[in-house]
Amino acid sequence: MSNLVLEQMIMNIRVYLPSLYQCAELISLLDCYTSIAYYSNKTKTVRPKFSNHIKIIDGRHPILDCRSDVVPNNTFLSQKDGRFIIIAGPNMSGKSTYMRQVCLLQIMAQMGCLVPAESATFIPMTHIFSRVGHNDDLVRNLSGFSVEMSEMATILQNANQSSLIIIDELARSTSTEEGIGISYAICEKILAIGAFTLFATHFLDMAQLEICYPEIVRNYHFSSMKFNGNDYDTTPHKLFKGPYQGPLYGLDLASMTTFPEKIIKDAERLAERLRTAKRESSFLDTTSKIEFNNTFETIENFETNRTI
């Protein structure tokens, strides 16, 4: 008997399904507009403008904006004056949060919401791509590095001049030499595409990209940290123009965890040996080049004098 009643009720409701779906869609749209209006009214926001460049003055992350200690940062990207931004800095300095902030503000502006900033100008984007995180994919039998390369291949195939791309610490799951090589090659491909890009990295050598593409690439960095005992202080999460010279403070942050002290000491000793070896190798390479040039000049002068 209950099944008959249930079937009859379903039959009666079925004719109203299109209207019910439309009502649900209208209610969800009204809820979205109400949420946007409530957020814009309760938060210090500004009406975004649209032009041929991205210029955000004192932009704030919309989720972190409820905190009193949130640090605003500026953003500027232009097709003719720096559309590819390289961001370096120590761990926990704010690189990933800053890139997500720019993407969220872009989305909010294009959906008609006011944005948390002093002033904001955006370019209408057709695509927003993100390559963040370093998790493997057990379902597709892909390692973390394979996932990175697979996602980057999709981005490179679909990005265009109206795309915004954020890339967070690309190719760090392989060797340093291969990671820098892969990152550099991918960056050059993105530069050829013409997409607007924020590229965060711990590969400080990537700053050399600005030398090769001075009109397109710009280097920025987050400030260094200062450690006080078991705590740290920083010029808080502020973005500065120019390449970052280090250090990255990985060992200092590790020492703040429950790592055994002996492991930290061994790591510091090994890191110092590696840095010393790198400096000595660089010095020897420079010396060899100078000796080679002097030898070449001596031979050249000898040949010239003999000819005379």
Image (cartoon, rainbow, N blue to C red):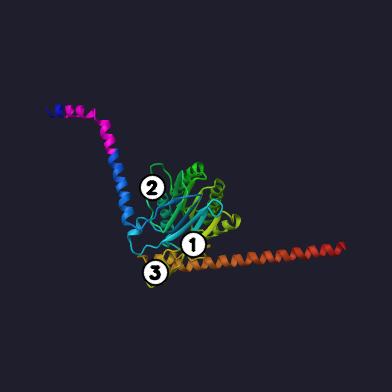
Tell me the SS state at disc 3. Answer: strand
Extreme residue in the right direction: 308
Most foreground residue, 99 or 62: 62
| Residue 221, label in figure | 1
Residue at point 27%, 41% (across, down): 27
Q: Which residue type carries mark 1?
A: His
Is residue 12 one of those drawn in magenta?
yes
Q: Is residue 138 visible?
A: yes
Q: Which residue type carries mark 2?
A: Gly
In this image, 84 relative to 118: left or right? Answer: right
Crowd around label 2: few <14 · some 14–19 · many ≥20 (10 Å)? few
Figure check: 41 above or below 290:
above
Q: Counting residues from the N terminus, which is met first, the one under dot 1 or under dot 2?
A: 2
Q: CA distance from mark 2 to mark 3?
A: 39 Å
Q: Which residue is mark 3?
A: 232
Most foreground residue, 292 or 113: 113
Q: Which region of the structure is painted magenta?
A: 6-24
Residue at point 40%, 45% (across, down): 137
Quarter containing the C terminus: bottom right
Q: Nearer the viewer, mark 1 or mark 2?
A: 2
Crowd around label 1: few <14 · some 14–19 · many ≥20 (10 Å)? many
Q: Which residue is mark 2?
A: 112
Residue at point 14%, 28% (across, down): 5
Q: CA distance from mark 1 to mark 2?
A: 31 Å
Q: Nearer the viewer, mark 2 or mark 3?
A: 2
In this image, 160 relative to 66: left or right? Answer: right
Q: Counting residues from the N terminus, which is met first, the one under dot 2 or under dot 3?
A: 2
Most foreground residue, 273 or 170: 170
Q: Counting residues from the N terminus, which is met first, the one under dot 3 or under dot 1?
A: 1
Residue at point 30%, 52% (across, down): 38
